[in-house]
Image (cartoon, grey):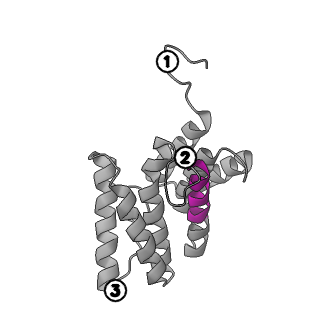
Amino acid sequence: MAERQGQAAPDAVLTRIGQAVMLHHAGDREEARRRFLGLWAEIGEHGDPLHRCTLAHYLADTQDDPGDELAWDLRALTAAEETADDRPGAHEASPAVRALYPSLHLGLASDYARLGRPDAARTHLRRARETARALADDRYGEGVRAAIRRLESRLEEGGRPGDRGLPGQRP
């Protein structure tokens, strides 16, 4: 589809990722994981960083094993950082990727907490909190900030911090 009146053509890969996310949110985790893995095979390790970041981020949520979830979340963060400028920690990426950073770090914090690595969990939770300042005061931003607060409370209490607390993500 060509650009028309200044509007960019829809991104077919992001559309397909969104369709699989909807399946996951509707409770069909296995089919969502199957579709995500099919997309990963298509775009590969060297595909567009935004596609890899988004896909790996959502694919992590469909994993049964916390170690596998961590591996996918690390892939997502690595791809996000490929879109940033050369300054370490600058997070000067596209607006789409900047909006994902808080959730990426929150996911990693949750992964590390479930794997019994509280120091790594706290590090990523701090990064999630820092990057969440840039989020709008909309439903997404408020949801991410609330999930950060819930995980902080769980880490402080020493309880099971398995729930990222974001809609559609498994406890």
Placement of the N terminus among the 4 image quadrants: top right
Query: What's under tag 2, amino acid-wise?
Result: Ala
Whole-percent x, y for residue 104 in the image: 48, 60
| Closer to viewer: mark 1 or mark 2 | 1
Q: Which residues lie in the magenta part?
A: 72-84
Q: What element carries label 3?
A: loop
Q: Is residue 8 left or right of residue 45?
A: left
- What residue is shown with label 1? 6
Label 1 to label 2: alpha-carbon separation: 28 Å
The mark nearer the N terminus, 3 or 1, is: 1
Residue that sits furthest to the top in the current view: 5
| Closer to viewer: mark 2 or mark 3 | 3
Query: What's under tag 3, amino acid-wise?
Result: Gly
Residue 163 vs 102, above or below: the answer is below
Q: Main secondary structure of the magenta part?
A: helix
- What residue is shown with label 2? 20
Q: Is residue 97 left or right of residue 130?
A: right
Query: For the point 56% across and 44% down, which residue is it?
Result: 17
Q: Is mark 1 on a helix, strand or loop?
A: loop
Residue that sits furthest to the front in the current view: 87
Placement of the C terminus among the 4 image quadrants: bottom left
Is 141 inside the magenta-drawn segment? no
Front residue (pair 86, 43): 86
Disc 1 residue crowd, few under 14, some 14–19, many 20+, Cα 10 Å: few
Query: For the point 49% across and 76% down, which residue is it?
Result: 112
Whole-percent x, y for residue 143 in the image: 31, 55
- What residue is shown with label 3? 158
Disc 3 residue crowd, few under 14, some 14–19, many 20+, Cα 10 Å: few
